[in-house]
Amino acid sequence: MRPRRQTRPVQIGSSFVGGEAPISVQAMTKTDTRNIEATIEQIRTLEEAGAEIIRLAIPDMEAAEALKSIKKAATVPLVADIHFNHQLALKALEYGIDKLRINPGNIGDEVKVKRVVNEAKARGVPIRIGVNAGSLEKDLLYKYGRTPEAMVESALGHIAILERLSFYDTIVSLKASDVITTVKAYELLAEKVDYPFHLGITEAGTRWAGTIKSSVGIGYLLAQGIGDTLRVSLTGDTIEEVKVGFEILASLDIRHTKPEIVSCPTCGRLEYDMLKVVEEIEQRMTALDIPLKIAIMGCAVNGPGESLEADLGLAGGYNTAMLFRKGEMIKKIPQENMVEELWQEILALANDTKK
Ligand code: SF4
């Protein structure tokens, strides 16, 4: 692991991205923003899952108007994702949006860019420049092709527009749908600016392939010390994106905010339906926001070893399983009660940890 790249802290609502701020996990709603009720409902679910910043697509004025009610219902900072239309950005700012995702170079007219940037500055609202390999400027494509260099030059162009207007509360993302291009682009830009980076692999794919792609790309960059906030994009459930984001941070020992399960791959020594226990416990733990390490192991051969390292450990056996708390075996539990007894112990430990 390399030390974290030094970036300027940028305030978003009541939290920060960059500087010494913890690397945050973002989410994006998948509802039609114009459907206020459904969008608020999804924001609530995402907040419960731990999302720390939530972005909404604002495709038209009706969606921008919906922000008036949506903003009041949210507790985490909200980001308006806007393409081209400066009126939508101004409306989002009017309703108290915490951050804009807009590329100033795409707004066109300089007067319009100035209005948005000055309004954002007056309200202390940061702007994320989101360069996407799929929508690069034609001249850059002609000059470089769809390459990391083209992405970096595109980002520098947008940054220059903001800097000319003395705007520095900027966050940058450089997303491509393949890992190598994305990684290279972030590495190149990291040498040139000190703005915080929002990491992500765009259109990463399905839950299965997208999780792997995102973990490799985002994980690699984080291990290089690059990245201040992240969003995992998957085709599917938005909650999964948040879970994967936290899992990436936990697996690199960057942040532990949620309980994690350490479980063995199982083999011929397995003596109970371990998968069922793991899935049930994992499901129940999604509501907990305490970093506990729970080991669920298949047998008494390797099980106790791992269990000793964990806050709670279960080493399964034919009829009974051994339950360990902080390295000590506290009881044996019959197979039919494994889930319930382990869950009660997790809740008790979570309560003790909170005190
Ligand atoms: S803990 Fe036991 S069941 Fe699990 S993989 Fe190791 S030997 Fe096999």
Image (cartoon, rainbow, N blue to C red):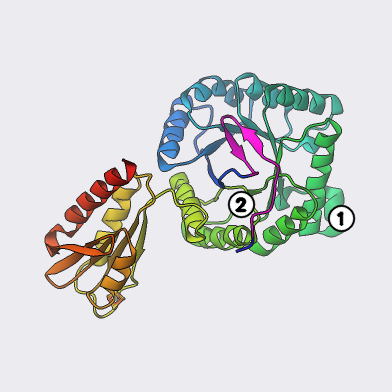
Q: Please state the horizontal and vertical placement of residue 259, each as a whole percent of the image.
A: 37, 52
Label number found at residue 200: 2
Q: Is residue 156 visible?
A: yes
Question: Residue 142 vs residue 303: left or right?
Answer: right
Q: Taking 73 as reference, is 314 above or below it?
A: below
Q: Is residue 146 visible?
A: no
Label number found at residue 159: none
- Mark 2 and mark 1: Cα distance apart in space: 25 Å
The amino acid type found where label 2 is placed reads Gly
Q: Label 2's element?
A: loop
Stretch in magenta:
3-19
Q: Label 1's element?
A: helix
Question: Residue 268 vs residue 124: left or right?
Answer: left
Q: Taking 175 as reference, is 273 above or below it?
A: below
Q: Locate the C terminus and report the quarter of the image it occupies.
A: top left
Q: Taking 153 as reference, is 316 above or below it?
A: below
Disc 2, ligand 1: is the CB inside 8 Å?
no
14 within the magenta span: yes
Question: Which marked residue is nearer to the observer: mark 2 or mark 1?
Answer: 2
The answer to which of 304 and 298 lies nearer the viewer is: 304
Question: Where ligand 1 lies, by quadrant?
Answer: bottom left
The residue tagged 1 is 142
Q: Please state the horizontal and vertical placement of residue 160, each as a whole percent of the image.
A: 84, 40
The amino acid type found where label 1 is placed reads Tyr
- The part of the image, by quadrant, that contains residue 301 is bottom left
Residue sitting at 52 percent across and 60 percent down? 252
